[in-house]
Amino acid sequence: MLNFLQRIGKSLMFPIATLPAAALLVRLGMEDMLNIPFMTAAGNGILGNLALIFAIGIAMGFAKDGSGAAALSGAIGYLVLNEGISAINEDVNMGVFAGVIAGVIAGVLYNRYNDVKFPDFLSFFGGKRFVPIITSAAMVVLAFILGYIWVYPQYVLNATADWILNAGELGVGVYGVLNRLLIPVGLHHVINTLIWFDFGTFETGSGEIVKGEINRFLNGDPAAGHFLAGFFPIMMFGLPAACLAMYAAAKKERKAAVGGMFLSIGLTSFITGVTEPIEFSFMFLSPLLYAVHAVLTGVAMVLAFMFDVRHGFGFSAGLIDYLLNFNISENPLMLIVIGLIMAALYFVIFYFLIVKLNLKTPGREDEDELESEDNTTLDGDYDAQAYHYLKALGGPDNIKSLDYCTTRLRMQMEDRDDIDEKAIKQNGARGVMRVGKSNLQVIVGTSVEFVAEAMRKRIDQNNMTAPDAEPTTNETTTTEKRTVSKDGLVLPVTGNVMPLSEVPDQVFAQGMMGQGFAIDPTDGIIHSPVDGKVLNVFPTKHAVGLQMENGLEVLIHIGLDTVKLEGKGFESLVEDGQSVEKGTPLIQVDLDYVKDNAPSVVTPVIFTNLESEQVHLHKEGKYDHGTTGIVTVE
């Protein structure tokens, strides 16, 4: 159920991405801005059809390949469901729930029937063409059922909405705490969808009925904005102050390494309201701090309500939305006062807890166990590595399911407590993440595919026979630092250069894979950034590993979660073992396809085998491929 709900939360991100455009159109078209009524009407065209947009986006998110056929089925499913229910009982109004239900069912049916085959005389209706048909049939049945029984859950939902919207400080406080607590499992989008797009109604001057906190606020509802205002003090002041506290508490020798990261993610939160890079920097390392963060969010929501502040956003509660909606807000300057109070609370509480409890926030980590004398190396022996992982994970019988992505093993465990986390890390893992009650992720690195296949082979054979070659123990040695000058590496692709901490994936952002930088590419040719040779082109062609002449290894990972594309959209231009020079074309990418079918095209460039060396990013912003002076390694 957790996995299922997480998929809904993840799928909601795609339609929610339309919000900034809608909010901007609505706001700019108002009388106090550009006074262009049709622009406001255009924005409301998006906000007024969110249920349909959700049906399309969720269906695409649930479909195993993000197919447009699933999206069409979601749209048809919503239209059939909505009109069918209205014909039975025009007083029933499911709102965004109808879109969510239609999208989920359409996505599930697509995965089940997208390759169905019929006899020749019916073959035209087979495959993906059958999905809208079966979805329509399912929606007819569901419309008949919900047309008669939805009045009861609608009554409960309306009563709940009335309580939340009219419970004053308690209502907004509870919502603020839940909003943050649900982020680790990806369910905050579900509760946000209800508050932002469904709860509350308001009749505009033209007689149009709008629903949801965001839509009502943008259209002038004097009762809307209380459930949005309290986020501004957190995102603009509180979390940046938390960054300052973590920096102040970092070890002296680590301050330089983490200072740039904290400055970058703090500014990102202040300006745009994007907080995930900050929250994921301590969410798993120090759950206590995250619980404190959730409570403080509730406090900020309560304070904003008590001082009668109404403010809203179309994207997130950062400086941009604060200024854009300043003129239609109520008591907006009070948010700065509250923000300064929250900044002080965040800094004092975070710093005290980190130092007093010795919490392992970035910059305070213990020396990596992988460098200790007990650390073992398996030198590419994936069967041996699989054996030791399985042993540390409690054996084959303790693993219910095993999957992997580009860098990590994803498992469902019978007994997650029956694992030896220290042994897992000692055998090469860079981190362990616990998700939900039974899910476990082990950060292995770029060899994860081979390790996972070796583990599967042993699990299928129930083979826990020790490998012939036992791992050897590393001895502490002194090695000369391998450096890269400003001319030693060139930008591999035209695009926007950014710090690794801004990558929307915590494994890369937290440096679990190694140090480096990232690019948001605008060109489809990935070139070699260094002189050296190709270590390996991944079978799915979404990543390539290089080895420099000094032994440093560089991984170029094109996009995020692109392993799921199974090679579609990528064409390899080199082969394993081939010598390359700076500027040699490596991979050709269909950027449009990847953008449509993967969460992000942001491309991390990682040094995967650094020892005592440090990577320094010297340039950020838009640059052409071949640009020098991007990074140095010292």
Image: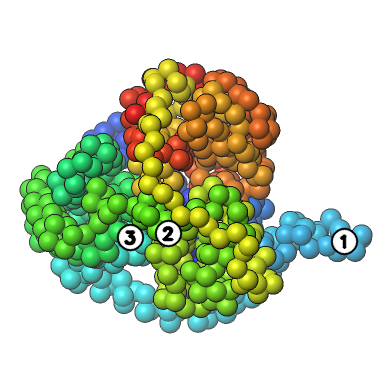
Residue that appears at 66% across and 28% down: 578
Q: Residue furthest right?
A: 120
Which residue is at the front of the view, 555 or 189? 555
Q: Which circle's residue, 2 or 3, is located before the other in the chain?
A: 3
Q: Are marks 3 and 1 in contact (CB under 8 Å)?
A: no
Q: Is residue 593 above or below residue 168?
A: above
From the image, tell me which residue sits under label 3: 284
Percent coordinates x, y for residue 535 in the rendering: 60, 36
Percent coordinates x, y for residue 629 in the rendering: 38, 20
Percent coordinates x, y for residue 353 in the rendering: 14, 60
The quarter of the rendered structure image containing the C terminus is top left
Q: Are marks 2 and 3 in contact (CB under 8 Å)?
A: no
Which residue is at the front of the view, 158 or 243? 243
Which label lies toward us, 2 or 3? 2
Left or right? Give the position of 175 relative to 80.
left
Q: Which circle's residue, 2 or 1, is located before the other in the chain?
A: 1
Left or right? Give the position of 454 relative to 264.
right
Report how many numbered discs are placed on residues in the image. 3
Left or right? Give the position of 343 relative to 205.
left
Residue that appears at 65% across and 44% down: 540
Which mark identifies residue 425? 2
Residue that appears at 55% across and 33% down: 546
Q: Are marks 2 and 1 in contact (CB under 8 Å)?
A: no
**Considering the numbered disc 2 on the image, is that residue within a helix, a strand or a loop?**
helix
Q: How many residues crowd mark 2 within 10 Å: few (<14), some (14–19), many (20+)?
A: many
Q: CA distance from mark 3 to mark 1?
A: 53 Å
Left or right? Give the position of 34 relative to 222.
right
**Considering the numbered disc 3 on the image, is that residue within a helix, a strand or a loop?**
loop
From the image, tell me which residue sits under label 1: 122
Q: How many residues crowd mark 1 within 10 Å: few (<14), some (14–19), many (20+)?
A: few
Q: CA distance from mark 2 to mark 3?
A: 16 Å
